[in-house]
């Protein structure tokens, strides 16, 4: 959702380097609403393959493949407060890999999705730690990390879309894993076009002992 030449993310409008407080940066015709999420986008070429697949399954969809850490929710505080809290909490997590599994569906909601073969434990740990403060929300459904392929579709089309998704996914020519290296805090609009507010990079954690030895080594070099 940056206004540049890069591929769109959750929607078709991208605001690069926009902070939550800059309400005057919203493009004409877009009105923000109190609905926010925390996601990690899949890189290309896998991400583009999944976007193309999703547009094939649901032609009016405006996707950018992502895995969700905090599902869409209203905030119980200011966006600036939520961003600050999430930024600080993200520092406790290392980058990690996710491997994608098979196409399946949620029977209760008719959502067709790709399950995660690995990485769900890391995402659940993030969810449990970050679902607090200004972002605290009681989910209607239990948090279950996945990659959405089709949702909000007529019930009579679910079985057909499900079968098409399975066939297309089996034919995917790309590796079915990706690295989660950054998180994106996003906000929805009245036209369901999501706006990027801030990106939080994940940094490898350095054990205290290792960090101490590095400091001592640098200090020794300076004394030498």
Image (spheres, grey):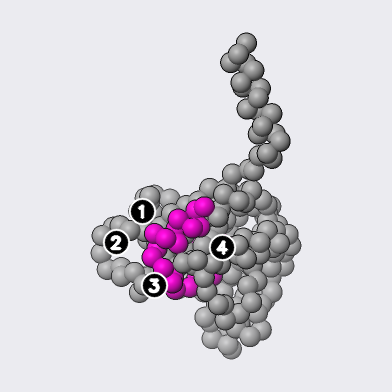
Q: Earlier in the sequence, mark 1 or mark 4?
A: 1
Are the two marked residues, 2 and 1, in contact with CB atoms closer than 8 angstroms?
no
Location of residue 143 with respect to 202 vertically, above or below:
below
Task: Give the quadrant of residue 111.
Answer: bottom right
51 lies left or right of 168 = left
Q: Earlier in the sequence, mark 2 or mark 1?
A: 1
**10 Å crowding of disc 2: few (<14), some (14-19), many (20+):** few
Q: Which residue is mark 2?
A: 23
Q: Nearer the viewer, residue 115 or 46?
A: 115
Q: Which residue is mark 3?
A: 34
Q: Is residue 196 visible?
A: no
Q: Earlier in the sequence, mark 2 or mark 3?
A: 2
Are the two marked residues, 4 and 3, in contact with CB atoms closer than 8 angstroms?
no
Q: Residue at x 71, y 36 (%)?
A: 209
Q: Earlier in the sequence, mark 4 or mark 3?
A: 3
Q: What label does residue 93 carry, if any? A: none
The residues colored magenta run 64-88
Q: Residue at x 44, y 70 (%)?
A: 75
Q: Which residue is mark 1?
A: 18
Is residue 79 on the magenta stretch? yes
Q: CA distance from mark 2 to mark 4?
A: 24 Å
215 lies left or right of 10 = right
């Amino acid at each position: 959702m940056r206004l540049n030449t890069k591929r769109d993310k959750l929607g078709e409008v991208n605001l690069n380097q926009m902070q939550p407080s800059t309400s005057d940066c919203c493009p004409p015709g877009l009105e923000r609403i109190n609905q926010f999420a925390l996601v990690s986008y899949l890189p290309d070429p896998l991400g583009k393959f999944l976007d193309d697949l999703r547009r094939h399954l649901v032609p009016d969809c405006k996707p950018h493949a992502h895995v969700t850490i905090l599902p869409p929710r209203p905030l119980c505080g200011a966006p600036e407060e939520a961003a600050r809290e999430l930024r600080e909490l993200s520092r406790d997590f290392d980058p990690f890999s996710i491997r994608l599994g098979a196409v399946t569906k949620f029977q209760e909601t008719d959502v067709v999705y790709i399950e995660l073969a690995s990485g769900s434990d890391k995402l659940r740990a993030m969810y449990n730690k970050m679902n607090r403060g200004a972002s605290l929300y009681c989910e209607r459904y239990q948090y279950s990390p996945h990659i959405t392929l089709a949702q909000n579709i007529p019930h009579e089309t679910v079985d057909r879309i499900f079968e098409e998704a399975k066939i297309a996914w089996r034919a995917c020519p790309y590796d079915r894993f990706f690295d989660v290296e950054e998180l994106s805090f996003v906000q929805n609009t009245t036209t369901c076009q999501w706006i990027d507010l801030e990106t939080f990079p994940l940094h490898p954690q350095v054990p205290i002992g290792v960090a101490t030895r590095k400091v001592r080594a640098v200090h020794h070099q300076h004394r030498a």
